[in-house]
Amino acid sequence: MSTSQSPAGPPAPGGGEPARLTVLAGPTAVGKGTVSADLRRRYPQVWISVSATTRPQRPGEVDGVHYHFVTEDVFDGYVERGELLEWARVHGRHRYGTPRRPVEEVLASGRPALLEIDLAGARQVRAAMPAARFVFLAPPSWEELVRRLVGRGTETEEERERRLATARVELAAEPEFDVTIYNDDVRRATDELVGWMGLPAS
């Protein structure tokens, strides 16, 4: 296991730091959703933002739980009214965005909050909320990332190639983040993430 650390090191678990936003990003198919789901199950005290997206709903996904699935017109309205903290068109196709108001309300309440978003979104949040902690979720290796992407079986060959090209660019952005966590084991990666959030491991 290897983890890059910010100069101050990770906060002590339960150290009483004021709640602040944590942003989790990383390349496609690295397992951000899996880590977030594990965190949601084992650490219910952490609020996890639900993104809006224009992409079609996949089998097993629940509207309002995994994503808010909306039309292009509805998404346009969010953008025009400034209701998104960040948004981006991912892989040159569908748009994803983080509703602003729920994030602001949760942070004001003092509850720890997590955004699981893509690289472009993380950059927008850094500009809007520079005090947030930015965590990069990395694969154990490039070969493992390819295996996970192909193994999902949810994309066409053309889509896989597009996502792999995007992943190469995303991996190069790792130095922009405060912390890197390697997703070689979901439970361990989740525990490391909540440690950086200042929470005791379960």
Image: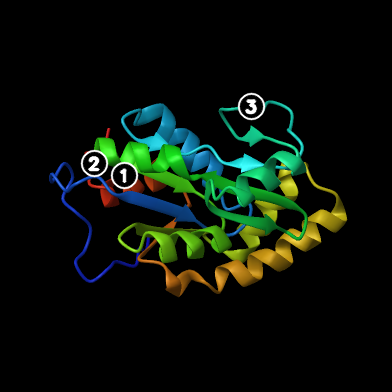
Position of residue 74 in the picture relative to residue 64 (left or right): right
- Give the label on residue 39, or none: none
Residue at far left of view: 15
In the rendered structure, which disc, 3 or 2, sits on the residue that comes first in sequence? Answer: 3
In the rendered structure, which disc, 1 or 3, sits on the residue that comes first in sequence? Answer: 3
Task: Please state the horizontal and vertical placement of residue 196, each as a whole percent of the image.
Answer: 28, 52
| Most foreground residue, 76 or 137 | 76
Q: Is mark 1 in CB contact (under 8 Å) with mark 2? A: yes
Three-letter code for the amino acid on which mark 1 is drawn: Val
Cα–Cα span, label 1 and label 3: 26 Å
For discs 1 and 3, the disc positioned in front in the rendered view: 3
- Give the label on residue 199, or none: 2
- Give the label on residue 194, or none: 1
Position of residue 133 in the picture relative to residue 87 (left or right): left
Three-letter code for the amino acid on which mark 3 is drawn: Asp
Question: Is label 2 in a helix, a strand or a loop?
Answer: loop
Q: Which residue is mark 3?
A: 63
Three-letter code for the amino acid on which mark 2 is drawn: Leu
80 w.r.t. 51: above or below: below
**Residue at image coords 21%, 63%:** 9
**Residue at image coords 55%, 42%:** 33
Q: Is mark 3 in CB contact (under 8 Å) with mark 2? A: no
In the rendered structure, which disc, 1 or 2, sits on the residue that comes first in sequence? Answer: 1
**Residue at image coords 78%, 62%:** 162
Question: Is label 1 in a helix, a strand or a loop?
Answer: helix
Cα–Cα span, label 3 and label 2: 29 Å
Task: Please state the horizontal and vertical placement of residue 128, each as a whole percent of the image.
Answer: 42, 61
Toward which corner of the image does residue 93 lie, by quadrant?
A: bottom right
For discs 3 and 2, the disc positioned in front in the rendered view: 3
